[in-house]
Structure formats: structure tokens, C-alpha cells
């Protein structure tokens, strides 16, 4: 991984203890166990919310609007949340965001179980959760380096985070489909609220010994400007975030439109929706585990455009499927491509970013992934209402492929900027110790 030591480099990729090396840190072990439980509940709520909205309204546009409300705060609050995450204690911030998220889930559960919930209450509560997530996501990403303690385990922790998210993405929707069919959406929200107890307990039990790097506090506007200049002037950071934002804008609406595919196109029910979401989660989980087995970040840059192309192509293929079994075979490629791009982008960004600006950069990462997605959901819902969900995915997949091709075109320029940073960090010892030998092999390192 990014700061690999020689003892780790001598291990083979078949050594599974190597794939879980970040769990050596007690704090990260606590976080991993508590978050694994909580995320299952989170995915249950996502599936239950989309199904409930579609059941109440039978509207693709309102389906997109509900998703928009839950994610758009990450876009508008992103830069500001990044400044405060760099100022505040990230550990305490996460405790607060998790408690507030638990309250939001219990509010959803109470309204749904009382059978009084309306579409506008769902949208308002989704908006509240989105505001919480606007601070939670950059704090969570920036806190990873304090949990793992050993910088050489940072990349592995990011990959394990992705594995954790996608293992829950595999389990949560499948459970949600069964629960919705048996007792209704309200119990999914209730289970989600209870699941937050696990991550809150794990955070409280931590002993945070690694001091958070903090620059001297200045005016908020000055720090906002500094963060923007840092992100926009860096060719690697800017390029990675732009492609990620494009993929989120044109590709992520597929999750919002999934109830339409499950019910009207594949002629299934809530259990079909759960299986479709779980199938995408299988591919994402495989992708994350492959990244966990990597010894170095070298080669991740090349994987970003490849994964964007896989994501786009699989979306197009899925849009033409009219059989459940074929859709279940195609969606793992969609999850694989998206997760490979997300995790590779996250790892490279976390590797090259300055510590005192980490919160602001990860806030822009959250904006690109989570903040741009609601605009895609809103546009996707409106377009699907006009031309149909399948045609909408064909357009989105084609644009994602085009974005990947452009990124591949400028990749040599990105490498030229990243290589000195890797050399300074010791990630490219072969260049630091023997540039001539690397040149003689005519094998340029791939960042």
C-alpha cells in the first residue's frame, strides 16, 4: 500500500492476513466492527425509502426528488463542512453525526409504523439526513489516518472501508426485501435506528492517540479559498474529482431508478429490488477486496478510466435486459466498476493530499460522489419519466465511457504531477534510488 514497509512487501497477495492488516490498529478494529453492523441498517433504509416513495406516488420524478433531497446538502455544504472538519475534533464530530442519524431513523420508523407518513415528510427527513452526512462523510474519510496509526496501512484501511460498505450493501438490501414484503418499510427504519448503537459504542470506546494535524484557524472565507485553490490547481486532484463527479451525475441515477426496473420492467416486487441491489453489491465487494490485496498504489491511476468504462458499459447492457437472471449477472459488473473507481480515487487522493487540508479535500470528494449524485437523480428521474428508464441508462452509460476515455488520454500528464509526490513519500524507491535502471527497462511507473 502507499507507505509499504519491506516486511509487508515480502508477503504474497495470497496471504489473507495481509489483506486485513489495517485491523491491527485497535481503533480501526472497533470502527470496522461497529460500522459493519450500522451500514447494514443504512442500506435497509435506502431500499425501504425508495420502495416506500414509489409505492406511495408511483412517480419516477418524485423518486428522483426524494433521492435529491437526501444527497444535495453534500454539494452545497461540502466546502464549508471541509473547513470545519479540519478545525473540529473529527472523533467527536463522528459521535455527534451518528447520534443525529439514529434520531432521524427513529423518526422515519415512528411515522411509517403509525401509517401516517407522506412523501413530503420522507423528503424533509431525507434532507435532514443529507445535512448530517455532509459533515459525517468528510470527517469519516479524514479520520481514517488517525485510526490506523501506521501510514503504510492507510490504503488498506480505505479498501477495507469499501469492503465493509459493499458487504453491507450485499446483506442490507436482501434483508430489506424480505422485511418489506413481510411487515413493511417501517421495520427497516426501526432496525436501522437500533443499528447505530453499534457504531456509537465503538467510537466511544476508542482511545485516540494520533494527533489531528490542524493549521492555525483563520477566517472561514480564507480557508474556503485556500481549499478551493489547492484542489483546483492540482492536476491529479482536479482530474480525479471531475471524472468522479461525471460518473456520479450520469451513472448513479441507476440506483434511484431500480424500483422501476424491479417492478415494471422485470415484473417483480420488493424482493426483486433487494436482489438487484445485492447483485450490484457483490461486484463492488469483489472490487474492494481486490484493492485490499494490493501492495502498492502504483497502477491505480490506470484503473480509474478502465473502471469508469466498465461501469458505463455494464449500465448500457443492464438497460437492455428484460430477464431477472440476466440482470443479476450484469449488475455485479456495474458495482465492480463504480467501486473500483471510487476506492482507487479515494486511495490516490488520501495518499497525495497534505494532512492539514485533508478534511477540505475529502469534502470535495464527498461533493463529487455524493453531492453531484442528487442532481443526476433529479435529472435521471425527469428524463426517465419522459423517455423511459432503460433509455436514460443508455445515455448515462455512454457519457461515463466517454469520460473514462478522456481521463485515459490525460493520464500521462497526471502521472507527471503525481510521480514527484510518490518519490518524496518513498512510494517510488526505484525512482529515488535508480532512475537510470528504470529508464533502461523502459517501463514507466503507473500511478
Image: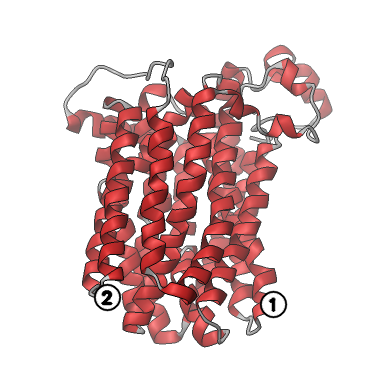
The quadrant the C terminus occupies is top right
Q: Position of residue 331 (x, y in %)?
A: 63, 67
Asked if residue 219 lies left or right of residue 281, the reply is left
Q: Position of residue 276 (x, y in %)?
A: 58, 70
Q: Position of residue 220 (x, y in %)?
A: 18, 31
| Residue at 27%, 54% in the rendered image | 104
First in residue order: circle 1 vs circle 2: 2
User: Residue under circle 1?
Assistant: 325
Of circles 1 and 2, which is in front?
A: 2
Residue 115 disc label: 2
CA distance for labels 1 and 2: 34 Å
Q: Are marks 1 and 2 in contact (CB under 8 Å)?
A: no
Query: In terms of secondary structure, where does tag 1 sit?
Result: helix
Mark 1 Cα-neighbour bin, 10 Å: few <14, some 14–19, many ≥20: few
Relative depth, front residue between 418 and 81: 81
Q: Is residue 367 visible?
A: yes
| Residue at 34%, 41% in the rendered image | 136
Q: Quadrant of residue 323?
A: bottom right
Relative depth, front residue between 360 and 94: 94
Amino acid at each position: 500500500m502507499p507507505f509499504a514497509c519491506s516486511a509487508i512487501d515480502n508477503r504474497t497477495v495470497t496471504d489473507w492476513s495481509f489483506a486485513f492488516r489495517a485491523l491491527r490498529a485497535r481503533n480501526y478494529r472497533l470502527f470496522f466492527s461497529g460500522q459493519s453492523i450500522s451500514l447494514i441498517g443504512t442500506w435497509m433504509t435506502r431500499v425501504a425509502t425508495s420502495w416506500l416513495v414509489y409505492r406511495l406516488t408511483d412517480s419516477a420524478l418524485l423518486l428522483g426528488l426524494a433521492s435529491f433531497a437526501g444527497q444535495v446538502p453534500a454539494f452545497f455544504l461540502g466546502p464549508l463542512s471541509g473547513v470545519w472538519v479540519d478545525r473540529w475534533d473529527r472523533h467527536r464530530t463522528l459521535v455527534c453525526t451518528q447520534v443525529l442519524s439514529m434520531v432521524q431513523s427513529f423518526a422515519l420508523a415512528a411515522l411509517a409504523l403509525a401509517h401516517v407518513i407522506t412523501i413530503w415528510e420522507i423528503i424533509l427527513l431525507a434532507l435532514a439526513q443529507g445535512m448530517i452526512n455532509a459533515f459525517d462523510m468528510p470527517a469519516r474519510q479524514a479520520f481514517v489516518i488517525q485510526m490506523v496509526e501506521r501510514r503504510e496501512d492507510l490504503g488498506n484501511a480505505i479498501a477495507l472501508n469499501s469492503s465493509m460498505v459493499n458487504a453491507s450493501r450485499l446483506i442490507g438490501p436482501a434483508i430489506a426485501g424480505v422485511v418489506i414484503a413481510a411487515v413493511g418499510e417501517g421495520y427497516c427504519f426501526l432496525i436501522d435506528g437500533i443499528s447505530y448503537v453499534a457504531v456509537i459504542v465503538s467510537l466511544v470506546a476508542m482511545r485516540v492517540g494520533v494527533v489531528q494535524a490542524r493549521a492555525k484557524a483563520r477566517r472561514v472565507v480564507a480557508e474556503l479559498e485556500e481549499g478551493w485553490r489547492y484542489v483546483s490547481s492540482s492536476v491529479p486532484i482536479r482530474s480525479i474529482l471531475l471524472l468522479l463527479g461525471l460518473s456520479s451525475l450520469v451513472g448513479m441515477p441507476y440506483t434511484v431508478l431500480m424500483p422501476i426496473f424491479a417492478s415494471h420492467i422485470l415484473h417483480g416486487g420488493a424482493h426483486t429490488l433487494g436482489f438487484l441491489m445485492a447483485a450490484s453489491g457483490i461486484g463492488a465487494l469483489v472490487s474492494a477486496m481486490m484493492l485490499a490485496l494490493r501492495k502498492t498504489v502504483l497502477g491505480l491511476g490506470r484503473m480509474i478510466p478502465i473502471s469508469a468504462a466498465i461501469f458505463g458499459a455494464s449500465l448500457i447492457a443492464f438497460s437492455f435486459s428484460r430477464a431477472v437472471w440476466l440482470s443479476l449477472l450484469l449488475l455485479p459488473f456495474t458495482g465492480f466498476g463504480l467501486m473500483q473507481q471510487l476506492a482507487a480515487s479515494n486511495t490516490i487522493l488520501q495518499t497525495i493530499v497534505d494532512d492539514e487540508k485533508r478534511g477540505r479535500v475529502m469534502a470535495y470528494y464527498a461533493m463529487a460522489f455524493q453531492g453531484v449524485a442528487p442532481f443526476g437523480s433529479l435529472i435521471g428521474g425527469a428524463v426517465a419519466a419522459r423517455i423511459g428508464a432503460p433509455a436514460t441508462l443508455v445515455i448515462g452509460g455512454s457519457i461515463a465511457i466517454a469520460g473514462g476515455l478522456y481521463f485515459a488520454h490525460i493520464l500521462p500528464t497526471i502521472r507527471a504531477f503525481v510521480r514527484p509526490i510518490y518519490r518524496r513519500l518513498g512510494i517510488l524507491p526505484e525512482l529515488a534510488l535508480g532512475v537510470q535502471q528504470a529508464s533502461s527497462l523502459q517501463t514507466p511507473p503507473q500511478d
